[in-house]
Amino acid sequence: MLERLPDLVNGNAVLVRRGRHLSTTFLVEAGPRAWLVHVHEGRITSVEPGPFRMASWSFALRGTAEGWAKFWQPVPPPYYQDLFGLLRQGELRFEGDLLPLWANIVYVKGVMGALRGNRGEP
């Protein structure tokens, strides 16, 4: 499902503008599944599905499959509407170099929320 991020994000001019200062690679985990999301100046250049050996990334969003499934519902239940809700519920961890994450948190929240309501499994 994350493979659809380039189309969903790059077609959203407001979201791309928010991320215009971010060029990095970050890891997203949903239970046993993982993806590397490559970003250049707010545009998603590619999404690589795992598993990985010695992958390089700046920060990671490591969550449970159940937590992400609730987050990506068209209308998420209470406490699952936001990355901070997932964090508070113990369904998500932030790891790695958190400076680019915090500096671009509104963009990252928008990227992950772009998948909300799209059909398919994570």
Image (tube, rainbow, N blue to C red):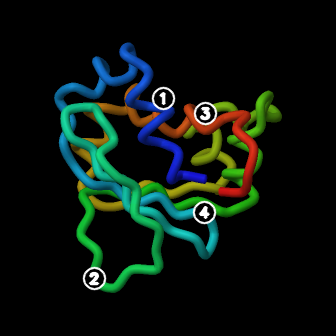
Q: Quadrant of residue 60?
A: bottom left
Sequence-earlier tag: 2 or 4: 4
- Which dot marks residue 54? 2
State which mark lies toward you, 3 or 4. Answer: 4
Taking the image as shown, residue 119 lies to the left or right of residue 24, namely right
User: Which mark, by number, is residue 110?
Assistant: 1
The residue type indicated by label 1 comes to: Gly
Give the spatial CA distance, label 2 vs label 3: 29 Å
- Reading the image, the residue beneath label 3 is 82
Residue type at tag 2: Met
Amino acid, disc 3: Asp
Q: Classify residue 36 by image quadrant.
A: bottom left
Q: Amino acid at mark 4?
A: Ala
Q: Residues within 10 Å of mark 1 (few under 14, many from 20)?
A: many
Residue that carries the numbered disc 4 in the rendered image: 30
Give the residue displayed 28% in from the left and 28% down from the top. 19
- Number of the front mark, 3 or 1: 1
The percent position of residue 61, horizontal first and vertical second, equals 46, 55
Few, some or many residues within 10 Å of mark 2 (<14, 14–19, 20+): few
The circle drawn on residue 13 is none
Please tell me whether residue 104 is drawn above or below residue 91 in the rendered image. Answer: above
Quadrant of the snapshot with the C terminus: bottom right
When the figure is inspected, residue 14 is found, relative to residue 29, above or below; the finding is above
Question: Of the residues under marks 3 and 1, which one precedes in the sequence?
Answer: 3
Q: Earlier in the sequence, mark 2 or mark 3?
A: 2
